[in-house]
Image (cartoon, rainbow, N blue to C red):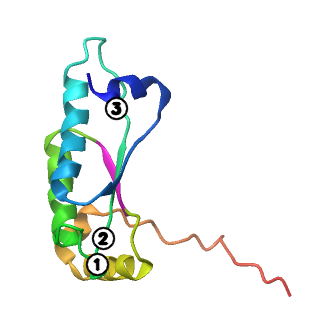
Amino acid sequence: QYPIEGLYPFVDIYLAETMSVLEEAFQVVDALSIFYQTQTQGELAKHPLLISFTLRSDGKVRSGESVSEVIAKLIQRAYEKKVELIGVLFNCCEPEAITKALQEIRSCSDIHHHLYHPPLLSKRCTTTSLS
């Protein structure tokens, strides 16, 4: 049995934190996929997944993999395994490393079509001055 089965009734979302190599994240995606495929109770609602990586000081995943390659491969794996990956995060690393990773993501147009870009704020939204 996977821990996923025991957690399922008590959670709304799964969060895998401090992944240091893409293969670890793949194992999480695969475990969720297997869990949903083996359920005999009919169609269970699939809880979404967030995966968080830890980074080196140069902005790469601890294994040395570039974040843009990791994100592209992770999105593809989740799609193939029918797992709803709703976010890729960074934790347990220097803020400067996250800045470098985000700069790499911004400059890699190959993955932009996979990323959610929120709509611009409505003109109804205004900022209020406290003067």
Q: Position of residue 96 (x, y in %)?
A: 40, 83
Q: Residue at x 58, y 70 (%)?
A: 122
Name the residue beneath numbered marker 3. Answer: 46
Q: Considering depth in this image, is 97 or 34 the residue closer to the camera?
A: 97
Name the residue beneath numbered marker 2. Answer: 55
SS under mark 2: loop
**Highlighted magenta segment, given as a residue range:** 84-89
**Quick check: 75 left or right of 5?**
left
**Quick check: 77 left or right of 116?**
left
Examine the residues drawn in magenta and state their main secondary structure.
strand
**Quick check: 123 left or right of 64?**
right
Q: The disc labelled 2 sits on which kind of residue?
A: Leu
Can you say whether 102 is above or below 74 in the image?
Answer: below
Q: Position of residue 87 (x, y in %)?
A: 36, 55
The residue sitting at the top extreme is: 41
**Alpha carbon separation for disc pair 1 and 3:** 32 Å
The mark found on residue 59 in the picture is: 1
The image quadrant where one finds the C terminus is: bottom right
